[in-house]
Image (cartoon, coloured by chain):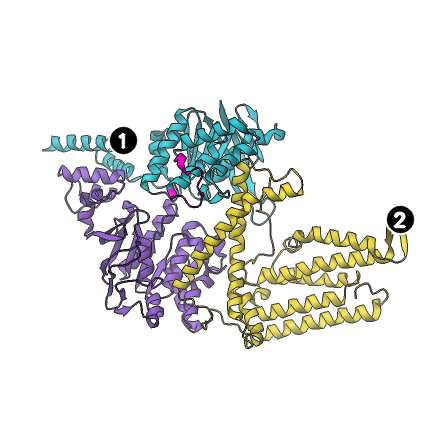
Chain colours: A yellow, B cyan, C purple
Amino acid sequence: MRSLNNISLGQFIPGDSLIHRLDPRCKIVCTFMLLAGLFMASEPLDFVLWCALPCLFSRLSGTSMTTILKTGRPVVFLVAVTVFINLLWTPGHEILRIGPLRVTWEGITVAVGMGLRLFFLVIFAAMLMMTTSPMDFSAGLERLMSPIGRLGLPTSEMAMMMTIALRFIPTLFEETDRILKAQISRGADFDSGGLIRRARSFVPVLVPLFVLVFLRAENLATAMESRCYSPGAPRTRLHPLRWAARDSVAVICLFSFIAAVVALDRLVLGGVRPFR
Amino acid sequence: MSIVVSELRHTYNEGTPARSEALRGVSVVIERGQWVSIVGHTGSGKSTLAQHLNLLLLPQSGSVSIDGTDVTRDAKNLRGLRRRVGLVFQYPEQQFFAETVRDEIEFAPLNWGVTGRELDECVEMAVRSSGLDPALLGSNPFAISGGQRRRAALASVLSMRPDYLVLDEPTAGLDAAGIRELRQLMASVRDEGMGVVQVTHDLEGALANSDRILVLERGVGVTCGDAESVAEYLLRSPVQGLLMPPLARFIAGLRERGIHLPLTAGVGDVINSLEERLGCEV
Amino acid sequence: MQGVTYSYQGATAPAVTGVDLEVNPGEWLALVGANGSGKSTLAKICNALQIPTQGVCRVMGLDSSDPANTGEIRRNVALVFQNPEDQIVASIVEEDVAFGPENLGLPSGEIQIRVDRALELTGLLEYRGRGSSSLSGGQKQRLALAGALAMSPCALVLDESTSMLDPEGRESFLGCIGELNAQGMTIVQITHRMEEAVRAGRIAVMERGRVVWDGAPELFFGGEYLRWGFEEPLEFALHRELLARGILPGATLPVAEDMLRSLCL
């Protein structure tokens, strides 16, 4: 039976671990460093080293390894497609041939590297989201973006939008699940027919969902206004962001680790450079 | 002809930290032509039970059979069985998507391949039993009044001609007049031979209207019976999150003062016995 | 607070027409009426979310039509709406409560104090670090209440705030309100259910945008409510009949326990 209950997209899990207490700016910077590192060093062998990070993260944040790995589930299909395409369309030294399909040694390297890179990308991002409350995340982002704000971009409004969007994800899943079930109980069939028929069968779910979201948005705007929110006005924070020594330590440690992996990749592994 | 639920268990998110047992062995029989209320606190598992009746959820353990067909044994025919049990969700008007009320009502029968004259009959029947104003069939379902919207939503489920009708908190968001009309409607489809199941946290409404009541507490059916026996049970052993209706509380208070009345007695009876008692004293 | 004076006369908008109403400090006013009688519009006017098209609304002497007063009015008159889901902004309980004070630009120490107090008043202190979506319906509505209280308002306007709650949630929410009122908070409670209005100190009836009746609860529950077409709960019918037969003294409220106490048995 279709149900959205089990989807976890790296939702925030409240906690009080070392990672939870890091400044959101620190965590955002770290995540970006990691993503950059991933793109600079993605030899299959590098991933053995990258694996150390989720393990360490799991220890420090008290999140189980299964929970971390599960966040990669929604992209498994995407990863599979990427692997498949790279496997078959990378020219090089041929090792296997099935009809018109050719598998090359380079293809395998590229495919595995690409797949793992995508998977790690999602997992690293999820590690950030699981340990940073949406409010903190948007505050951190707002502060990091403040140089752009001086150019006239509404950074604080954008941050508030992000907070609310993240807050409403669980609610939206619940609503979608309810509407889906209601239409199934009225005989709606989402599983049979061709692509177009299937796409059309989702109209009875999407229309009510949009109506509901608009209604919600309007009510929420009124409620926010009644609590003295006015866009652009200066706001303070319950927990002001404080960059502590541990944040600097975290950034430096991670930077050293990433630099080491990249250096190792360039100097020792060298060899084939599939991604340019 | 009945729905038989026996020893039903259901656990959400098995194997994850969010694991929660919604149903822990519930049994109930729902006869056609009867109005059964399932009452319980928030999280008692009553909505999960309702979704099993409509086969949106299948038994993980225990069984559900509809008119003698065990649903787990007949998995190929889920859609066919599902048609026999109409499920009206809380705030059903939130599921509207069509351009006209008629399209909305035709959605269910069309999904089961009903067309032509039979389809028209389905619509006509649904409009009649839901009390919807037939003049509104051509209107936009989002533009009609609240009360009519709820009726249109009911009609859009009744049009599949179910043998059983399951309603999840049907009176939510209605004003007093709307609630009264809805109850009349439910009683009339019951009298026509449909099995009516009402899932609610409104104990007072359940006691006053249903033929039988099942009380759920944390996934377990604690009592099941007619209004008087359920009220007596709840008076003896209160269930979390269920408040005795005020009149029943009053009658319970009278018992302590030596006036014995059934807990579901009407206002008239209470007044008569009070007058009798006070008359004696004077 | 010197007095919430509220008068609103002759609107062109059909929602509310020529309403004169004055709510005194510390009062608990129940504003009752059928769906669409203009109660919610009135609530929004109290909070300067809507500005009277005619007439004036004064909150503590401040005219709501003057944009300079808007902030002050919203700080003093807090609103709690019908659906808790539509009022919760943040994913974490304490962060949501802090939303209002943050908008006021208060220093974080002060916000912390207010959040603690609001959470304590609503009995949510132990949930402060929890996800707001993990709360039950009744808890969510108390969270919305805490968010309103964190503004340190003088008055609370509850717009059908209990209509989506189960009986248990409703009881705990109204219990909170009762305590706040006992501590001097002005309450304007909007509802269409008679049994919810019994705790109020004063009742006003709205019909088609007008306040058509305004008076003491004893008078109202003595039978006056029938004139305005409200549905009669069973215990109310009993109460009315017993009053008419002289079995109950006049000042009894139509609450089971109250009536039992007043009976001479």
Q: Which residue is mark 1?
A: B265
Is the residue B198 above or below the residue C182 in the image? above
Which chain's residue wears label 2? A
> Is residue B134 inside the magenta stretch?
yes
SS under mark 1: loop
User: Chain letter of disc 1?
Assistant: B
Q: Amino acid at mark 2?
A: Arg
Instruction: Please give the label number shown on residue A97.
Output: 2
Figure quadrant of the C terminus of chain C: top left
| Residue B244 visible in the snapshot | no
Q: Could you tell whether B273 is left or right of A149 in the image?
A: left
**Bounds of the magenta segment:** B132-146
Position of residue A86 in the picture relative to residue C28 (left or right): right
* Circle 2 crowding by C-alpha within 10 Å: few under 14, some 14–19, many from 20: few
Give the residue drawn at x 39%, y 55%. Answer: C142
The magenta stretch spans residue C221: no
